[in-house]
Amino acid sequence: MKGYKNWWLPLSVLILLAGFLNFLFYFDNKYQTPPPYGRSGMIMLSERDLDREQPIFLIDGWMLTDERVTDMFTYIGEFSNLQRGDMWASPHGQACYELTLCYEGDSQVVSVDFPQISSDYTVFMDGYELAEGTGKGRITFLLTPGSHHLLVETLSELGYYSGMYFPPALGTVEAFSRVNNIQSFAYAAAFLLPLVLAVFTLFLWQTGGKLSRCFGLLCCSYALYMFRYFVFLYSMPVAPYWFLVQNLALYCLCFYVVLLTALASESTSGKAWRWMRRVLLILPVVLMLLCLLTPIITWAVWMHGRLTDIYYVFTFFCVAFFAVKGMKKQNWESHYTLTGCAVFGTGLFANLVFSNRFEPIYFFWQFEWCSLLLVLVFGAMMISRSRRLLVENDMLTNHLEEQVKKRTEEVTQLLDERKAFFSDMAHDLKAPVFATRSFIEAIRKSGVGVDAELQGYLDQAEAKQQEMARRLQGLSTINELDKIKGEQIRIAIGEVLSEVYAAYHGEAEVQSVYFVVKQLGEEAFLMAQPEKLNILFENLVYNALKATPRNGSITVSARTKEDKINIIVEDTGCGIPEEELPLVFQRFYVGKSNRKTGTGLGLYIVHSIVTEMGGKISVSSTVGRGTKFIMEFPKDN
């Protein structure tokens, strides 16, 4: 714990929670309500007792009769079943609870409410049957001065509760209405709030990893556990078997508390977690089997109670173990997990210590309060985690933008240096390359010592010199293209086609080639740099002029389709062989028919310009019939 700075938070929560639970024990506890109290099978009532805002809880003075005892005085809640501490006795069977109500005062309509009877029951008042069923029950009658005999008969065959374990209450309709409204609102909030948190977490399940999924399942487990109130309130058909669902929800709640703490402390890869996980999964299976065996084996109920206490204590030690590990690692979740450990431990302590001494009037059991607070603590952790991740992502995004900007500047500088290098190299190489050509021509003209062998060497040298000259010309062209700066502007297609016709129809006429430009029927616009657009058409049209014979034709046209503009340059020239079509846009590629004069850069430059404008280009050709280039650009609306 050395260096841990957030110890004050779990300590403060622990102190406040202990004070709150102590407050509940005295102010929201049926066992701490004021008199009247029942004694020797009788309870004395007055009109003043019924004028209270809350009902009277019929806890003491009942006479119990079952298969093993007759007229034994007990209080409701003393025994959870008919076993009464004897593990070898049957926890199930028939039982009768009797109490005499002695009333002094004016006659008035009252009700006796049975909040939860885990058995089939029949209620009699003065020998008349007033109610029967399973789960929650209520009788309403006219309370007149004198003595009234209240009899409750129960019959249980399964489950670990039997008879009456939850004290009934007597009061006016108004008093019960007040209590029921508060209870219904409280349990509805406790049921819906975790579901809302689970839905919130659902959006994080794909990105938040195991921690988010675990928290969502924790919320669902708690919501399912709290749903028991409505099961018994509305006497649902599943009420006799709901203890199985309730237990399963509680085991899942404990498991996900441990798992969430382990994940937060980054401790799910060690041997300790693997060993604890086995115990946390095996014990609930054993407990569920014991629940199912209670109708058959008498000691199953007793064993279930002892193992449940062991399971809760083991769960708490698991949570404490991982909370301390997270605290030692000084991870950001440590103050949440340690706070959750304090809350969970307090709830388990209250559940064990105040057993058969506490039952809420308006709100929740102490363990339910602690579980709800635990859900809120982990909910705060998930919200804090999401906020931290957003901040980190924002910082990472800003840092990434800075890094991209820095790298872009470095790459731009490198490209500028490379362009300058190639420009200087092309300029410096022109003199020796063309000087070599002059020397070759001088040797040819002199004819001194030029035999057939030397003539062959001169031819090879001249071919290499011409290739080098074309390459230098290509480098010069690229350098000139790179010097064109400025942003793209909005250009009308009609103006572009008119300028193309004005620039090239004269040269086409000199070569006896028909040059046709077909305008669009409607105006359309695209974004481009005018200088690069001129270079694009210059390369395409001059290539077409070189390939087209006399009396041939070159057609430049445009058409629009939805948000695209197509510009087509088509000729009736010699065409391009099919095997060369995939290669024509490659840098320095020269076709067989053009190797003496071509640089291999014209169509490469065309392709680069089209791509830079956000378009694409394709070519189709038939040898002897002509070639068609189709360029597709995004339309600027």
Image: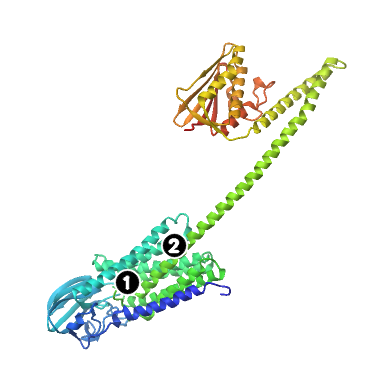
Which quadrant of the rendered structure holds the N terminus?
bottom right
Nearest the viewer among 247 and 522 is 522
For label 1, the SS is helix
| Residue 43 position within the rendered picture, expressed as x and y whole percent measured from the top left | 20, 85
Badges 1 and 2: C-beta atoms under 8 Å apart?
Answer: no
Q: Amino acid at mark 1?
A: Leu
On screen, residue 358 versus residue 504, left or right, reads left
For label 2, the SS is helix
Can residue 205 be seen here? The reply is yes
Crowd around label 2: few <14 · some 14–19 · many ≥20 (10 Å) = many
Residue 214's disc is 2
Dot 1 or dot 2: first in sequence order is 2
On screen, residue 301 versus residue 117, left or right, reads right
Relative height, residue 201 to residue 240 (above, below): above
For the view shown, which residue lies furthest in the bottom direction?
40
Residue 293's disc is 1
Can residue 118 be seen here? The reply is no
| Residue 432 position within the rendered picture, expressed as x and y whole percent measured from the top left | 80, 27
Q: Amino acid at mark 2?
A: Cys
Nearest the viewer among 572 and 273 is 572
Q: CA distance from mark 1 to mark 2?
A: 31 Å
On screen, residue 307 versus residue 636, left or right, reads left
| Residue 79 position within the rendered picture, expressed as x and y whole percent measured from the top left | 29, 81
